[in-house]
């Protein structure tokens, strides 16, 4: 039997990072500054080309660049980030007048979804909240 120190075990689920989707360069600079101030240094920048990649593969740095689909929404997806840091990022982006993106955290379920499925579900959820309707997540 062998033992490893917990801090030496590298799993995707434990990678503390933010996935940033579909922001222009000006907003990216602002977001990076806000993240730095919040103690988030690992940022993965994603574009429409990456929509067919699963969240797990994104976290493992195995990006696909083969998507021809286009999603116009902007999103920030947090993985293994404390809720107080997420709140600080959200508050600071609002203060700096960055148009509010879709916000999410990676879950046990969504880690296996393609980026496009996660974004579609986030869009549906935002639309439902705006219209006070109940939303059911789809994983297709």
Image (spheres, grey):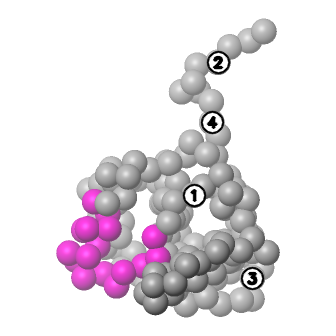
- Circles 2, 3 touching at the beta carbon (< 8 Å): no
Q: Earlier in the sequence, mark 1 or mark 3?
A: 3
What residue range appears in magenta? 88-103
x, y (%) of residue 120? 63, 81
- Circles 4, 1 touching at the beta carbon (< 8 Å): no
Other-residue count near label 3 (Cα within 10 Å), few / some / many at <14 / 14–19 / ≥20: some
Per the image, label 4 sits on a secondary structure element best described as: loop
Per the image, label 3 sits on a secondary structure element best described as: loop
Per the image, label 1 sits on a secondary structure element best described as: loop
Depth order, front residue of 27/123: 123
Q: Quadrant of residue 31 in the image?
A: bottom left
- 1 or 3: mark nearer the eye: 1
Other-residue count near label 2 (Cα within 10 Å), few / some / many at <14 / 14–19 / ≥20: few
Per the image, label 2 sits on a secondary structure element best described as: loop
Q: CA distance from mark 4 to mark 2?
A: 11 Å
In the rendered view, would you say 96 is above or below 59?
Answer: below
Q: CA distance from mark 4 to mark 1?
A: 17 Å
Q: Which mark is residue 10?
A: 4
Location of the N terminus by quadrant is top right
Residue denoted by label 1: 106
Other-residue count near label 1 (Cα within 10 Å), few / some / many at <14 / 14–19 / ≥20: many
Residue 132 located left or right of residue 55: left
Residue denoted by label 3: 67
In the rendered view, would you say 70 is above or below 58?
Answer: below
- 1 or 2: mark nearer the eye: 1
Reply yes or no: does residue 93 show up in magenta: yes
Residue denoted by label 2: 4
Q: Earlier in the sequence, mark 3 or mark 4?
A: 4
Q: CA distance from mark 1 to mark 2?
A: 26 Å
Q: Earlier in the sequence, mark 4 or mark 2?
A: 2
x, y (%) of residue 4? 64, 18
Residue 64 located left or right of residue 10: right
């Amino acid at each position: 039997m062998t033992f490893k120190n917990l801090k030496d075990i590298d799993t995707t689920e434990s990678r503390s990072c933010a996935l940033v989707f579909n922001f222009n360069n000006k907003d990216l600079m602002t977001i990076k500054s806000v993240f730095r101030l919040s103690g988030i240094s690992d940022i993965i920048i994603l574009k429409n080309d990456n929509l067919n990649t699963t969240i797990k593969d994104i976290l493992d740095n195995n990006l696909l660049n083969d998507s021809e689909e286009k999603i116009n929404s902007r999103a920030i997806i947090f993985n293994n980030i404390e809720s107080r840091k997420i709140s600080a990022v959200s508050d600071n982006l609002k203060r700096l007048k960055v148009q509010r993106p879709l916000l999410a955290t990676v879950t046990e379920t969504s880690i296996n979804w393609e980026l496009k499925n996660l974004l579609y579900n986030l869009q549906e959820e935002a639309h439902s909240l705006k219209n006070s309707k109940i939303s059911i997540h789809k994983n297709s």
